[in-house]
């Protein structure tokens, strides 16, 4: 019988849809409600029906237990972590996360400890990456794009270690606008 080849489990054409999985119920109402909400998040659309996943309850139980093991109680930290998972799993712009959880690419242990950055859609990751790159560029430009001087006094720290940049912000017949940055405290101001 050990030489017998095992057949893969057959996927039913119509998966069993339940609002509350038949996983062991705890004595804690918060944990039970969290399980119910996680189940609803995973069963919210066609993805899980197409995959025919019947073991959602086991995955969610593992995820919920792992979160509980990390947090040690059902206080706000536990609730916030569960809410974060629910929000990311329900995100219509991030179907890959739900699919990866249902297919087992992302294990319950992994989803339980993932950060919001890790759970984000590829589109959101690209937007965040571009915003970070832009912020770094602007920060570096402010540091390197000016002339150092002691002609200006910072109104915040009263030091004279400043860098200024002159830019034509209005029409060409108007005087240039001077932007000053204090090199000591980072205070910025505009000189008319």
Image (cartoon, helix red, strand yellow):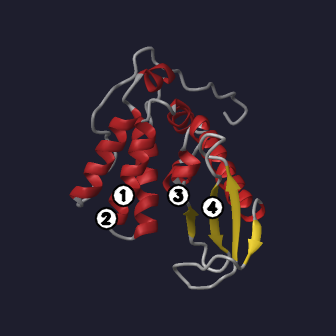
Which residue does the numbered mark 1 point to in the structure image?
80
Q: CA distance from mark 4 to mark 1?
A: 43 Å
Q: Residues within 10 Å of mark 4 (few under 14, many from 20)?
A: some
Q: For this rendering, which residue is in front, 145 or 67? A: 145
Residue furthest to the top: 13
Q: Is residue 127 above or below residue 77?
A: above
Which numbered tag is attached to residue 94? none
How far apart in space, not on screen, are marks 1 and 2 (Cα)? 6 Å
Q: Residue furthest front?
A: 173
Residue 179 numbered mark, or none: 4
Q: Quadrant of residue 71?
A: bottom left
Is 62 on the left-hand or right-hand side of 141? left
Q: Are marks 1 and 2 in contact (CB under 8 Å)?
A: yes
Residue 114 location, x and y as percent? 54, 54
Residue 58 shows in this picture = no
Q: Which residue is mark 3?
A: 113
Which of the 4 quarters of the picture holds residue 14?
top left
Do the CB atoms of the residues marked 1 and 3 lie less than 8 Å apart?
A: no
Front label number (2 vs 3):
2
Residue 5 horizontal side relative to residue 76, left or right: right
Label located before the other in sequence (1 or 3): 1
Q: Secondary structure at mark 4?
A: strand
* Relative to 155, residue 69 above or below: above
Q: Nearer the viewer, mark 4 or mark 1?
A: 4
Image point (31%, 64%), residue name:
76
Tell me how far mark 4 sits from mark 2, CA to CA: 45 Å
């Amino acid at each position: 019988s050990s030489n017998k080849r095992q057949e893969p489990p057959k996927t039913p054409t119509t998966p069993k849809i339940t609002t509350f999985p038949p996983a062991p119920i705890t004595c804690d109402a918060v944990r039970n409600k969290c399980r119910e909400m996680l189940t609803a998040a995973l069963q919210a659309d066609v993805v899980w029906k197409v995959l025919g996943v019947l073991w959602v309850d086991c995955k969610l139980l593992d995820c919920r237990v792992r979160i509980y093991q990390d947090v040690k109680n059902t206080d706000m930290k536990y609730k916030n972590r569960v809410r974060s998972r629910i929000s990311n799993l329900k995100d219509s712009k991030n179907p890959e996360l739900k699919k990866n959880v249902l297919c087992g690419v992302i294990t319950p242990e992994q989803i339980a400890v993932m950060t919001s950055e890790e759970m984000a859609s590829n589109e959101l990751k690209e937007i965040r990456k571009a915003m970070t790159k832009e912020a770094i560029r602007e920060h570096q430009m402010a540091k390197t794009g000016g002339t150092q001087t002691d002609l200006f006094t910072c109104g915040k720290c009263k030091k004279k270690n400043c860098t200024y940049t002159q830019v034509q912000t209005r029409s060409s017949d108007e005087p240039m606008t001077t932007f000053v940055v204090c090199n000591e405290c980072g205070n910025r101001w505009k000189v008319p």
